[in-house]
Amino acid sequence: MAVTRFLLILGMLAATPQVFAAGLFGMMEIRANSIESIPKWVNALGRTRAENLLEQCRNGGCTGKHKDWYELVEELRGKDRYEQMVAVHRWMNRFWYITDDRLWGMGDYWATPGEFMDKSGDCEDYSIAKYYTLRALGWDDDDLRLVVLRDTVRNIAHAVLAVQYDGENYILDNLASQPLQDKYIKQYTPYYAVNSTSRWVFIKPME
């Protein structure tokens, strides 16, 4: 994992102007306006577009949990952004956590929102479903990032959705009942983040 991350950083530095900024979890961020180096995310984006779940529901073509999701989106339209964020976070966190090997028979599969609502999923699947729900509510893509990181307490890889709201980064984590500001979360070290147009890697600031 360390070698892969190092190569990703080198590739981003070579391919794009260097854009350093104070970022998530107190790290320095490097942003590149390309997502091709994250193929699982590119694949999930394509399958979600093909799924076209929101339009299906709008035309009366969905039932069950898909319909419940559509009704949630319609209920939250026009409401306060913070209220939307909290409601989406809580609604998605009701689903059971199931590992990819049990659910899909493979080590790492990034599900579409429809697949997640049909079968549940693991950490990145919660994050993807929350990402698309907030996008359906009109949130700007620049305010949303799926973040792959290391949980240094459990010593495992994990994924969350980072949401920028009112000048703060809120972390929507399937392990937490409420969105929390990143500055209060000390056990997470981000590897990379991605949205529909850009990707970020992170470097620990010099002491």
Image (cartoon, rainbow, N blue to C red):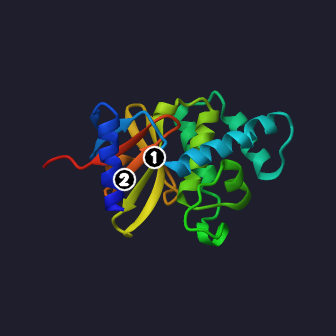
Q: Tell me if 52 is positioned left or right of 183 in this view.
A: right
Residue at disc 2, secondary structure = strand
Q: Is residue 24 visible?
A: no
- Depth check, front residue: 4 or 57: 4
Which quadrant of the rendered structure holds the N terminus?
Answer: bottom left
Tell me where residue 52 appears, x and y as whole percent: 73, 39
Residue 81 vertical placement versus 90 (above, below): above
- Depth check, front residue: 100 or 184: 100
Tell me where residue 103 appears, x and y as whole percent: 66, 68
Tell me where residue 77 appears, x and y as whole percent: 66, 30
Q: CA distance from mark 2 to mark 1?
A: 13 Å
User: What kind of residue is marked 1?
Assistant: Ser
Q: N-terminal of the two: label 2 or label 1? A: 1
User: What kind of residue is marked 2?
Assistant: Tyr
The circle drawn on residue 191 is: 2
Pair 2/1: label in front? 1
Which residue is drawn at the image coordinates 64% and 34% (left, top)? 136
Taking the view exactly as shown, the residue that stands out farthest to the right is 60
Local packing at callout 1 (Cα closer than 10 Å; few below 14, some 14-19, many 20+) is few
Total numbered badges shown on the rendered structure: 2
The circle drawn on residue 37 is: 1
Q: Tell me if 144 is positioned left or right of 6 in this view.
A: right
Local packing at callout 2 (Cα closer than 10 Å; few below 14, some 14-19, many 20+) is many
Q: Quadrant of residue 74?
A: top right
Tell me where residue 4 appears, x and y as whole percent: 36, 57
Which residue is drawn at the image coordinates 59% and 51% (left, top)? 90
- Depth check, front residue: 33 or 141: 33
Residue 168 vertical placement versus 116 (above, below): above
Residue 7 vertical placement versus 23 (above, below): below
